Amino acid sequence: MKPTIGITLALLGMFSLIGCGVTPRPAELVKTDKYMLDKSSVSRASRAAPQVFKVSQKYYALAEEAYDDGEMEDCAYYATMAAVKFSTAIEHAKRLAAEDRRAKAEQITEEANAVKAKETARLADLNKRIERAEKIIALSKKLESEKQKSAKDKKRIALELKEAKAEAKKKFEAEKKAAAERLAAEKARAKELKQEKEIQELLASAESKIQTAEALDSKTYDPGNLNSAKTFVEQAKQAMANKRYQNAKALAVDADKKAGVAIARSKAEYSKKKKEADLRKEREDLFKAANHLGVGCKQETRGVVLTLYEMFASRKAIVLPERTFLLDQIADLASKYKDYPIVVEGYTDSRGRGTDNLALSQSRAQSVLDYLVQQKKLRFERIKSSGYGEANPVADNSKAKGRAKNRRVELIFLFR
């Protein structure tokens, strides 16, 4: 662990002890803190995958900066990315360990092959002994041809020949049986080693995916598959310890699948929540920006509503030149937030005939639309206009101030 990370974590610990007023560290950042405090894991990750480990440190530093700046969404995102990169480095370390175990298994296989070769040589030696035994048989034939020897010598030689044959056969059968048993034991052990290596690789993959799933907060998004994966891993290890290799392999495969499902679901859920959070933040930014235009501004369920007053001369529908700067500012805002449709609504006070007021409000709304499209080059299909005359008053029409408030144009940035 770098000194800067240690100092940062120490300061975080000090701040967490200072009473009220401190924003709690997000769960994602707390989890990443634990990873970075685990000296053993940090050592393994930095040795096995130094580049990936550096990237995780970079994301961790960004998460700390976001936390200090109060950007909790960004902090959670960077902390999660730091945990994922850290988990990737750990996974690489596990793979290196698995490769080491595989190399040892291959060494054992080579040793078994050496034993097999030794036994083969021993069988060849036994064949030579058989040849010698056959020579003894040849001696028996020679015995028959040696008529000059006495019957006593013949009997003695025949007895020795019989005993030699029996002894040679007995030793040969015993050594052949022992060699076959050793060879069978070595084959069985080699088969076990192959099965153990395959299961260990499956378990390493499953455990790596489980760690990735935990980094993606599968405990929240998909605890069922995550817990099933962990259970299957433990059951697979127990089955392998009891040499139930077929059962262990099936459990390891199930664990890998369950962990994969947990990762996929967690990624999807996290992306969904991130998208929703980004959309909320964008709406908040739109509302903040609209508030700085110096016009009436409010946020409703349908969207952000901007209210403009005194845009027209009395009973006229042409925007006053000295008021077009407001439309210029709104056009700049619309250019920045291009994904929001715009509705222009015109309203009048209650003086005059209702049909005339309705026509005037429609003309004023259309005049604002024409300015935004023709002068500011906003897309025509993005903007709609309507006039409602004296409907929907916001103030008392019996008073001059109330009528002035009712004579208005509203521009609504509709939420998607």
Image (spheres, rainbow, N blue to C red):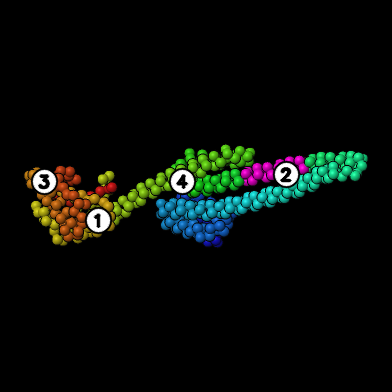
Q: Where on the picture, by quarter, is residue 388?
A: top left
Query: As drawn, is 102 to the left or to the right of 179?
Result: left
- Of badges 3 and 2, the one in the foreground is 2
Residue drawn at the location 55% of the way across and 61% of the way down: 3
Q: Amino acid at mark 4?
A: Ile
Residue identifier under label 2: 179
Residue highlighted by disc 4:
263
Residue 64 drawn at (x, y percent): 46, 57
Instruction: Select label 4 or label 3 by which is in front.
Output: 4
Q: Residue 99: image x %, image y %?
A: 58, 53
Q: Which disc number belongs to residue 334?
A: 1
> In the rendered structure, which amino acid carries the disc numbered 2?
Ala
Answer few, some or many: residues within 10 Å of disc 1's Cα (few below 14, many 20 plus, some between 14 and 19).
Answer: some
Query: Closer to the camera: disc 4 or disc 2?
Result: 2
Closer to the chain start, of discs 3 and 2, is 2
Residue highlighted by disc 3: 358
Secondary structure of residue under mark 4: helix
Task: From the viewer's side, name the closer residue of 88 and 155.
Answer: 155
Mark with earlier residue (1, 4): 4
Q: Which numbered disc flags the more N-terminal residue, 1 or 2?
A: 2
Mark found first going from the N terminus, 4 or 2: 2
Kind of residue indicated by mark 3: Leu
Q: Nearer the viewer, mark 1 or mark 4?
A: 4
Q: Residues within 10 Å of mark 2 (few under 14, many from 20)?
A: some
Look at the numbered disc 1 and give the secondary structure of its residue: helix
Few, some or many residues within 10 Å of mark 3 (<14, 14–19, 20+): some
Q: Is residue 364 visible?
A: yes
In front of the other: 69 or 85? 85
Q: Secondary structure at mark 2?
A: helix
Q: Is residue 179 magenta?
A: yes
Front residue of 84/404: it is 84
